[in-house]
Image (spheres, rainbow, N blue to C red):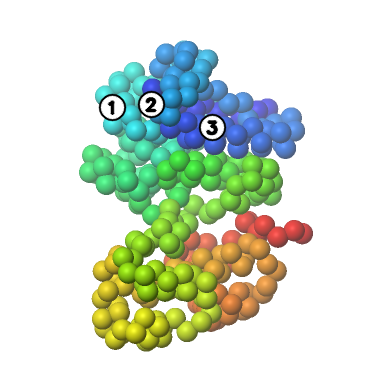
Amino acid sequence: MQRHVVIVAFEGFQLLDLAGPADVFAGATLLAGDSGYRVEVAAVTAGEVVAHNGVTIVAPVQLPDLPGPVDTLLVTGGFTVPRRLADRVLVEHINRLAGPARRVASVCNGAMLLAEAGLLDGRRATTHWLAAGGLADRYPAVDVDAEPIYIRDGRVWTSAGVTAGVDLALALVAEDYGHELARDVARGLVVYLHRPGGQSQFSTPMLAAVPRQDPLRELQTYIDGNPAADLSVAALASRVQLSERHFSRVFTDQTGVSPGRYVERSRAEAARRLLETTNHPLDRVARESGLGAPETLYRTFRRHWRISPGDYRRRFSSKED
């Protein structure tokens, strides 16, 4: 029997928040055979709904007419969410449908609609990093974590901005049908292979600001391209011909990240890529990524992505079997 997924849209929603998960569910249905998902788009009023980018979709069903229960209720986000919080019909029907649903989820700042409906009280949740402060300020009963790309707290799932909705949907598919099918869906969509929820919203370059000075910009490129090199503060300071103390101060001032933190994150990213694309044993992955020993590799992965290197490889490897 197909699982009934209802995706909630409203005027000004983010189109990719809907289209990304919907395509994931469609791909899973194609691969799962007789099971899979039946996806419906619902709005307060049935009919045309205009996304923020101007594209018009049709919501064939209106929320008040949905009897429930549904398997999965997914709420989109968008720039108009702050205004939608005052829409009592929208919020009340999100709350009504969420009650008996097996799962409730949001993409981007759709988390604010879940919070307005009281569905995130006492729960850990994430959202787009730009909306995290507003979510925390407006809903102090919510434990907001702006770092992960998605979070599961019981039956409630929340995700970061836009493309993280694809990661969220892949995680839901993995829960229902296993990681192998989720990986096949990701390959079919030619997207990043199902990232673990604990992974940061920021890649290493995104984590840091772009330095104003050319030597420091070149140094960032060198760090990311040479994880196994000597990347100590002394060595990096020498490359840009600064004292260690002055280098640390300038690097932190211009990037917002200390040299040590930037190097660790860059090496963790290098290890992640090796686990995805090679069969190298963990000691070689640790060595080539500059982390040195498997124990350090394990600790780094647990700190950054809340998953062990071995589990990460089993779930997200892209190498051919």
For the N terminus, which image quadrant? top right
User: Is 148 in front, or is 98?
Assistant: 148
CB contact under 8 Å: marks 3 and 1: no
The image quarter in which residue 38 lies = top right
Q: CA distance from mark 2 to mark 1?
A: 10 Å
Residue position marked by numbered label 1 in the rendering: 83
Percent x, y for residue 205?
Answer: 43, 62
Tell me, yes or no, whether the two marked residues, 2 and 3, touch with CB atoms within 8 Å.
no
Residue 106: image quadrant is top left
Using residue 60 as the reference point, say whether residue 119 is left or right of it.
Answer: left
Q: Are marks 2 and 1 in contact (CB under 8 Å)?
A: yes
Q: Which residue is mark 3?
A: 19
**Residue beneath the point at 52% across and 76% down:** 226
Quadrant that contains the C terminus: bottom right
The residue nearer to you, when weighing 163 against 138, is 163
The disc placed on residue 12 is 2
Residue at the front extreme of this rendering: 214
| Mark found first going from the N terminus, 3 or 1 | 3
Q: Amino acid at mark 3?
A: Ala
Depth check: give the residue in front, 190 or 28. Answer: 190
* Visible residue check, residue 93: yes
**Three-letter residue code for mark 1:** Arg
Mark sitting earlier along the chain (2/1): 2
Judge by depth and name the residue closer to the eye, 276 or 251: 251
